[in-house]
Amino acid sequence: MKTIGLISGMSWESSLEYYRLINQAVKERLGGLHSARIAMYSVDFEEIEPLQRQGKWGEAADLLVDAARRLCEAGADFLVICTNTMHKVADEVQERTDVPLLHIADATGEAIKAQGVTRAGLLGTRFTMEQDFYKDRLARRYGIQVIIPNEQDRQITHDVIYNELCRGEIKQTSRQQLKKIIQNLVADGAEGIILGCTELGLLLKQRDTEVPLFDTTAIHAEAAVEFALGR
């Protein structure tokens, strides 16, 4: 079994889900008292969020590269960045480290393609929804047309993530708001919905929509287990 290097803490609320899902999946596959080999480096998100907001992605990349190198020193065989938004700097992290990086958009693209979905609605931070690093990768590598919410719905989604979910707050009113946003995306032609922020799975479940829901946290964790077990 390979050692998984988790770059976590963005936020720790969803990083906790990575740890749980990965270990559960290893136990299911191997049985007995098996658990995953994991090295985790948890950053202080209070240092990274202002860099995102100010567009200082180079400085944010430096923090993640430092975390990645520490994980390599700890014996990680490959890296998992436990957030969608910070995959904006994933290529730089990969270039400046010596082990593979398992990209969340690739794992998600494979899962979407496997279900035959070609038009997917994307919920996430404003950075993930509005910038090209995520949408273009899905389009270029997997032929997936990404549909994003309107300006008002993007702001609502972004605010729910940063002001509530990253702080451990789960609100029924916000669930209803996001369900309405999903309905709008489906009306715009989305055949499935990408929960393109690792905290969104804390609030939204498959039962909240009739179209396939792609929880990137669960998908990424599953891909990490498959890679760790050499499958």
Image (cartoon, rainbow, N blue to C red):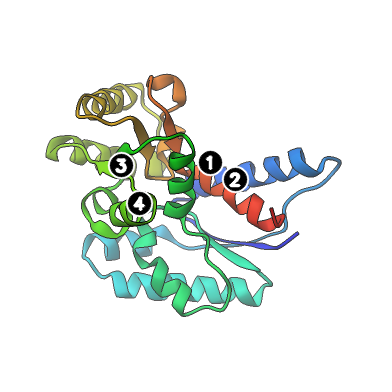
Q: Residue drawn 39% across and 50% down?
A: 142
- In the image, which is nearer the foreground, mark 3 or mark 1? 1
Marks 1 and 4, how far apart in space? 18 Å
Disc 2: which residue: 222
Residue 69 found in image quarter: bottom right
Q: Are marks 2 and 1 in contact (CB under 8 Å)?
A: yes
Q: Type of residue at label 1?
A: Ala
Vertical placement of residue 7 versus 169, above or below: below
**Secondary structure state at the residue bearing disc 4:** helix
Marks 3 and 1, how far apart in space? 22 Å
Vertical placement of residue 24 versus 138, above or below: above
**Secondary structure state at the residue bearing disc 2:** helix
Given residues 23 and 78, the one toward you in this image is: 78
Which numbered circle lies on residue 218?
1
Q: Residues within 10 Å of mark 3 (few under 14, many from 20)?
A: few
81 left or right, relative to 140 = right
Which numbered circle lies on residue 163?
3
Marked residue nearer the N-terminal end (4 or 3): 4
Marked residue nearer the N-terminal end (1 or 4): 4
**Secondary structure state at the residue bearing disc 1:** helix
Q: Type of residue at label 4?
A: Leu
Q: Position of residue 95 (x, y in %)?
A: 45, 78
Marks 2 and 1, how far apart in space? 6 Å
Residue 133 found in image quarter: bottom left
Given residues 22 and 16, the one toward you in this image is: 22
Marked residue nearer the N-terminal end (3 or 1): 3
